Image (cartoon, grey):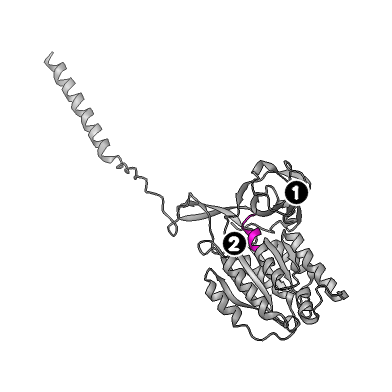
Amino acid sequence: MVHKVLLTILIMTFALGIFAQSGRNKPAETPTPKPTPRKTVGGYNPTEKITSLPNASPTPQTNQQIEDDNEVIKVSSTLVPIPVSVLDGRGIPVTNLRLEDFLLQIDGQEAEIGDFSRSETPVRLALLFDNSSSVSIAREFEKKAAIRFFRRVIRPEKDLVALFSVATVARLEQPLTKDVSLLVQAIEGFAPPAGATALLDGIIDAANYMREVQGRRVIVIVSDGDDTVSDATFENTLKALQLANCQVYVVKTTDFENYKRTGQRRGSANLRQLAAERRMQEFASQTGGAVYSPVDEDELDRAFAQISAELSQQYILSYYPENETDKRGEFRAISLSVKTRQNVQVRTRKGYYVPRQVNR
C-alpha cells in the first residue's frame, strides 16, 4: 500500500514539472492595445462631410475622407448646382415653391433633385467692366452704378466679389473680397478707357478664376458686347462658363452709350452690334442669367437692382449624377419645370459637362 502511495506522488511530481517547464517556454502574450481616438486633419474630423474647400474642381464636389493606416483617401461625388429663377406672368419672382414642385430632366429623362435651398447660399461674383475705348462716353455713370451694385449685393458675412477690367487685355483689378471699399477703390482707380476689346478672353479668364472657389458662381458683364481682339471663340467661351458652373448676367451698354451720344433712346443697330447682342443673349440664356439693355441712368441703376434682387430670390437645386463614366467630357442637357403652377417662367442653366475625371 505504501509503495502505491509513493508511486502516485512521484507521478504527480513529474507531471507538475513538465507543466511548469511548458509554461516557461510559452511566448508571452501581447496585450491588446486600446483603440486610439480618430485623428483630425487640420481640425477636421475625417468622418464628417467637407462643406468648403479652398480649391474646388471644375464642378463642385462633396467629399468624405476615410483614414486607413495613416493614409487619407478622399472619396468624391460630383455635384451639379442648378440655380433657378421662377417668375409669374407679371415678371414677379415666385418665392413659395417647394422641392416637390419642380420636375428635373437630364437628357430628357426624369432625374432626382438631390438638395433644395433658397438663396442664402453664398455668392461668388465677378464683375467684368469694359474699359475699352468703345464705351468711353457714359463710363463715369456706369462706374457709379457698379459701385451702388457692390454696396447693394454684397452680404459681408457670406458673399465675395472680384473685379475685372477688359480692354486690349483683361486684368484682375481686385481679387475676391467682402470689403466693398477695396472694390470701390479699384473701380475708381481704373485707367482712362482706351484700346481694343478682348471681351471673350476676359470672360474665360473670369470663368477660370471662379472655378477655384466654392459657392454660387455669378459673372456680371458690363459691356456693349463687342469684341475685336480675342483669341477665344464664342464656343470656347460658352464651354468655359458651363464647365465653371457660372451664371451670367449682362448689362449691355450699347443703347445707353447711343443715348448719351445722340439723344435717341433707341438707335438702329448695325450687323456688328447685332452679333454682339446675340452672343450676350446666348451666354445668359445657356447659364440661367439675363440681359438688361438700359437706355438712361434710371434704367441702368434699375438693371443692377434687378440683378441684386434676383440673386436674393433664387432657388438653388442640386443634382448628383450617377454612372457617368461612359459620358466623360460630354454635354448633358438640363430641363427644369414647375409641375404645380401654370404660366410661370423658369430660368436656369441649359446643361453641364461631365468631368473627364473625378479627383480622388
Identify the residue under disc 1.
344
Q: Residue 147, position in %: x, y?
A: 60, 73
Residue 15 sits above or below residue 126 on the image: above
Identify the residue under disc 2.
123
Q: Secondary structure at mark 2?
A: strand
**Magenta stretch in the rendered image:** 307-313
Prevailing secondary structure class for the magenta stretch in the rendered image: helix
Q: Secondary structure at mark 1?
A: loop
- The residue carrying pointer 2 sits among few (fewer than 14), some (14 to 19) or many (20 or more) residues within 10 Å by Cα, namely many
Residue 171 sits above or below residue 334 on the image: below
Give amino acid for label 1: Val
If the image is split into quadrants, where does the N terminus sit?
top left
Residue 224 visible somewhere in the drawing: no
Q: Nearer the viewer, residue 188 or 159?
A: 188
If the image is split into quadrants, where does the C terminus sit?
bottom right
Q: Residue 179, position in %: x, y?
A: 52, 71
* Residue 270 magenta-highlighted: no
Q: Residue 79, position in %: x, y?
A: 63, 53
